[in-house]
């Protein structure tokens, strides 16, 4: 649980050693850091994301995804309650 409970995630570990996190984000603005490269799949909801080395906010909604490079930070503006699945690459 992060940001006073506004973002919650659970880690799922697979037998091949890979892992994913499943979670939700309540409306708000958040900054995340990651050591590993990630694929963020938005399963429902709507947000805007600003990826590292970009000044552009990109709109993402349920059924869409975005990649986050390793060792970076990214910002999101969550517009509606949003469910996600994060795969570590």
Image (tube, helix red, strand yellow):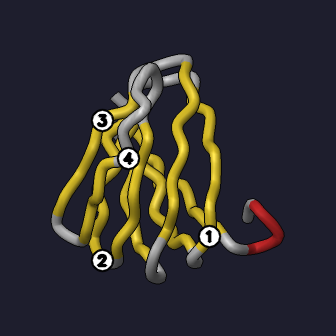
Q: Which residue is mark 2?
A: 44
First in sequence: mark 3 vs mark 2: 2
Horizontal and vertical percent for residue 40? 34, 48
Q: Nearer the viewer, mark 3 or mark 1?
A: 1
Report the residue at 19% width, 59% height from top.
Answer: 64
Marks 2/1 in contact by CB < 8 Å: the verdict is: no
Q: Nearer the viewer, mark 3 or mark 4?
A: 4
Secondary element at image label 2: strand
Which quadrant holds residue 88? top left
State the separation of the CA atoms marked 1 and 4: 15 Å
Quick one: 72 or 37, which is closer to the camera?
72
Disc 4 crowd rating (10 Å Cα; few below 14, some 14-19, many 20+) is: some
Q: Which residue is mark 3?
A: 67
State the separation of the CA atoms marked 2 and 1: 16 Å
State the separation of the CA atoms marked 3 and 1: 21 Å
Q: Which residue is mark 1?
A: 28
Report the residue at 55% width, 17% height from top.
Answer: 71
Q: Which residue is mark 4?
A: 57
Q: How many marks?
A: 4
């Amino acid at each position: 649980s992060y940001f006073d409970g506004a973002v919650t995630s659970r880690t799922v570990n697979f037998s091949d050693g890979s892992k994913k996190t499943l979670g939700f984000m309540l409306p708000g603005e958040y900054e995340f850091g990651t050591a590993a490269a990630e694929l963020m799949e938005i399963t429902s909801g709507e947000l805007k994301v600003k990826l590292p080395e970009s000044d552009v906010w990109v709109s993402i909604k349920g059924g869409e995804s975005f990649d986050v490079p390793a060792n970076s930070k990214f910002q999101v503006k969550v517009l509606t309650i949003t469910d996600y699945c994060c795969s570590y690459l």
